[in-house]
Image (cartoon, rainbow, N blue to C red):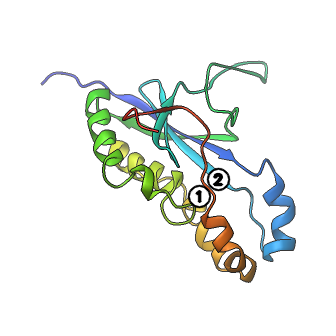
């Protein structure tokens, strides 16, 4: 039996509120939220994510630390450095197979017209890709966030406005469409 290659899979987690959710959520929602999460899966040297423009990718931010000093290089989203990185394990899925899978998703489940801030967003995409690559889910505090917000009277009142919001942090659409 030939040895198989395995590739690390990471989840990049960004707080779109830049700390404001933690400060304002108790007043506005009556419950503590630690952030408004945007996620991306990093594998094969690319950061993959779903936004209002479809499935995109870009080079991930790379970290090098020297005595707790963190310096990032590359990366293309205006979100900057992720607030945290979760190691999802390893995959044996080669980049070519992943790209075939992502193009299929971009033409069906995650096409441009399917984005919805609460029901079908970057986090549902990251969760599906993580399962495909590693068999693992992303953390539930991320996937449960929409239902937490919508379980409050303020969340329900804001839903029509929030449904119209589309997150587009830039990058390259995997199908070449915008």
Can you give x and y, in whole percent of width and height, for residue 7 in the image?
38, 28
The label on residue 77 is: none
Label 2, residues with CA under 10 Å away: few <14, some 14-19, many ≥20: many
Element type at mark 1: helix
Image height of 100 relative to 147, above or below: above
Residue at the far front: name it: 178
Give the CA distance from mark 1 to mark 2.
Answer: 6 Å
Question: In the image shown, does 27 or 54 lie closer to the viewer?
Answer: 54
Image height of 31 relative to 70, above or below: below
Q: Disc 1 marks which residue?
A: 142
Can you give x and y, in whole percent of width and height, for residue 45 in the image?
46, 23
> Residue at (71%, 73%) from the top-left corner?
158
Q: Disc 2 marks which residue?
A: 37
> Residue at (75%, 58%) from the top-left corner?
34
Q: Answer with mark 1 or mark 2, whichever residue precedes in sequence.
A: 2
Would residue 161 be found to the left or right of residue 99 on screen? right
Can you give x and y, in whole percent of width and height, for residue 24 in the image?
85, 64
Quadrant of residue 2 within the rendered picture: top left
Residue at the far left: name it: 1
Label 1, residues with CA under 10 Å away: few <14, some 14-19, many ≥20: some
Element type at mark 2: strand
Mark whose residue sits in front, 1 or 2: 2
Image height of 133 relative to 119, above or below: above
Question: In the image shown, does 48 or 156 lie closer to the viewer?
Answer: 156
> Residue at (69%, 37%) from the top-left corner?
79
Residues marked 1 and 2 touching at CB (< 8 Å): yes
> Residue at (74%, 64%) from the top-left corner?
33
Can you give x and y, in whole percent of width and height, for residue 132 in the image?
33, 47
């Amino acid at each position: 039996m030939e040895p198989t290659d395995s590739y690390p899979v990471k989840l990049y987690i960004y707080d779109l509120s830049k700390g404001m959710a933690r400060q304002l959520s108790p007043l506005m929602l009556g419950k503590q939220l630690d952030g408004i999460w945007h996620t991306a899966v990093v594998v094969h040297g690319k950061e993959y994510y779903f936004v209002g423009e479809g499935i995109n990718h870009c080079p991930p931010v790379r970290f090098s630390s020297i005595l707790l000093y963190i310096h990032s290089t590359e990366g293309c989203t205006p979100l900057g450095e992720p607030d945290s990185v979760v190691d999802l394990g390893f995959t044996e899925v080669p980049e070519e197979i992943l790209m075939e899978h992502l193009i299929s998703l971009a033409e069906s489940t995650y096409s441009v017209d399917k984005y919805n801030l609460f029901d079908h967003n970057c986090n549902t995409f990251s969760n599906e890709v993580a399962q495909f690559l590693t068999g693992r889910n992303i953390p539930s505090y991320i996937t449960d966030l929409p239902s937490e917000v919508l379980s409050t009277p303020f969340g329900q009142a804001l839903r029509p406005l929030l449904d119209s919001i589309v997150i587009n942090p830039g990058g390259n659409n995997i199908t070449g469409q915008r």
